[in-house]
Amino acid sequence: MSPEQLSRLDDDARVGRLREILQGPPSEAAWRALWELFAGWPDGESRARSLDAAERALAAWPDQLRLVTTSNALLHEGQSLSALARLVRVIEVHRREQHGAADLQAIASSPHIAGLTSLSIQRSEIDSRAWQALTESAYTSNLRHLHVSRTVLSAADLQRLFQSSRFPRLQCLKLIGVGLQPRRMDCVRHTRLFDQLSKLDLSSNGLGDDGVMLLSQEAAFLQIEHLTLRSTYLRAPGVRTLLAGARRERPQQLDVSGNDLTEQEGAELLALAASRNVSLIM
């Protein structure tokens, strides 16, 4: 249905269209149709009730389908997020450059993101004030995935993240190419690293063996089930240190592909990994 057709519908017809969308199978097309419908729906009691109904019906949908990027104007209402954000479970801040900080501020301050399960920030400029707002947000308790890629974080930003208590359900953390280096590793010392975290990806950071040695001193990092350190300037001693500290009682996975390891070192490390109940990817 075109925007022009939608604009001519009365509230009863809009409710009927909503029912039609929600009775069909979950799909990207249905998700887009839902946003288009609400975009032209005037504020009022009918829209509010229908938004509640849509939120309940979407509970059965996969979270991955309930995705929106912050470049979508319908997500915003002035400097805040619109009520439509209640329907979203995955938000991407992608290549927003100078808009990234404002996007993150709006997300962190909005009660409409209370159901958000995944937040991805890619190639965007994020200032420390916006990052602090996220790490102190009162609305991120359901976040399971936090992915930051090709976006530089300061030492203070990293410290705020690792010391934050606002992500109690976080399961997967990716900090890829964020500028993490050994001289900035004080932020990870004595951290509890989020109670439910099982996947950690620190790829494309200049960690080297020195950085890994520091990580290996923190018990929380050694208990991660899936640790990814691709292209981090690792050598055999660093990998050996990680494997030596692995917990044997449950299987773990360590991905160190993209690092400078010889064939002989690889064979040695694979044997050590097998003895430590670790699946080693090189």
Image (spheres, rainbow, N blue to C red):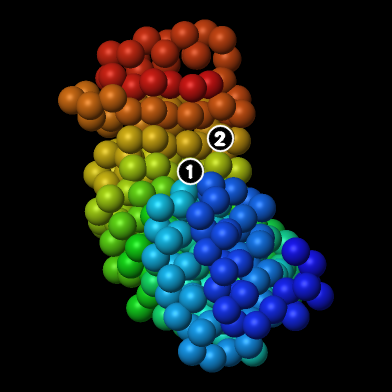
Which class describes the residues within 10 Å of circle 1: few (<14), some (14-19), or many (20+)? Answer: some
Q: Position of residue 198 (x, y in %)?
A: 33, 43
Q: Residue at x 41, y 48 (%)?
A: 172
Instruction: From this view, report whether residue 154 is shown above or below residue 43.
Output: above
Left or right, 61 with respect to 30, comes to left
Q: Amino acid at mark 2?
A: Arg
- Counting from the top left corner in percent of width and height, residue 18 is at 56, 67
Percent x, y for residue 195?
25, 53
Give the label on residue 201, or none.
1
Residue drawn at x 43%, y 21% as measured from the top left = 280
Q: Is residue 195 visible?
A: yes
Whole-angstrom CA distance, mark 2 to mark 1, is: 8 Å
Residue 13 placement: quadrant: bottom right
The residue sitting at 66% across, 62% down in the picture is 33
The reply to whether discs 2 and 1 touch (Cβ–Cβ < 8 Å) is: yes
Residue named by callout 2? 230
Confirm whether residue 214 shows in the render: no
Q: Amino acid at mark 1?
A: Asp
Viewer-nearest residue: 253 or 275:
253
| Front residue of 25 and 182 | 25
Q: Earlier in the sequence, mark 2 or mark 1?
A: 1
